[in-house]
Image (spheres, rainbow, N blue to C red):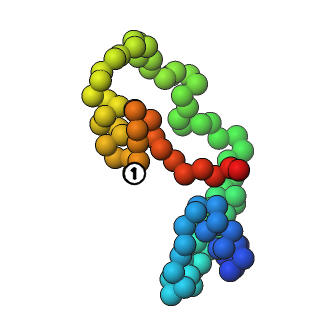
Amino acid sequence: MQIDDKLLARLESLAMIEVPEEKKESIKAELGEIVNFVENLNSLEVEGLEATFTTLEGKTPMREDAPMNDEEIPALILKHAPQSAENYFIVPKIIE
């Protein structure tokens, strides 16, 4: 699969990032290599092979669902937020 300018622009839009003009060609080449590598997986013959790992048989270990009320946790989390007030994140309005 070839990554062209149109696809790169769409990926920039979806990821909400802006790739500098001087890096666009190298990014397109790197993304193309990644996609080609993943496409190689389609050529593997896996019919009849048994899965070597699954969480269905061994099940995921469960922990006790015990509520906690630690006043420091919201403060610790919100400390990293660009904006917060009254234990809530403040985010820009995106829908009119």
Q: Is residue 70 left or right of residue 16?
A: left
In the rendered structure, the answer to whether residue 84 lies left or right of residue 30 reads left
State the residue lying farthest toward the bottom: 22
Q: Secondary structure at mark 1?
A: loop
Q: Is residue 20 above or below residue 91?
A: below
> Looking at the image, which is closer to me, 90 or 5?
90
Q: Residue at x 65, y 41 (%)?
A: 49
Disc 1 marks a residue whose amino acid type is Pro
> Hey, which quadrant is residue 62 in on the image?
top left
Quadrant position of residue 24: bottom right
Q: Nearer the viewer, residue 36 or 24?
A: 24
Residue 14 image offset from top left, x and y in percent: 64, 61
Residue 26 visible: no
Q: Residue at x 56, y 22 (%)?
A: 57
- What is the x, y in percent for residue 79? 31, 43
Q: Which residue is mark 1?
A: 82
Q: Residue at x 27, y 28 (%)?
A: 72
Can residue 53 be seen here?
A: yes
Residue 76 in the image: state x and y as whole percent: 29, 36
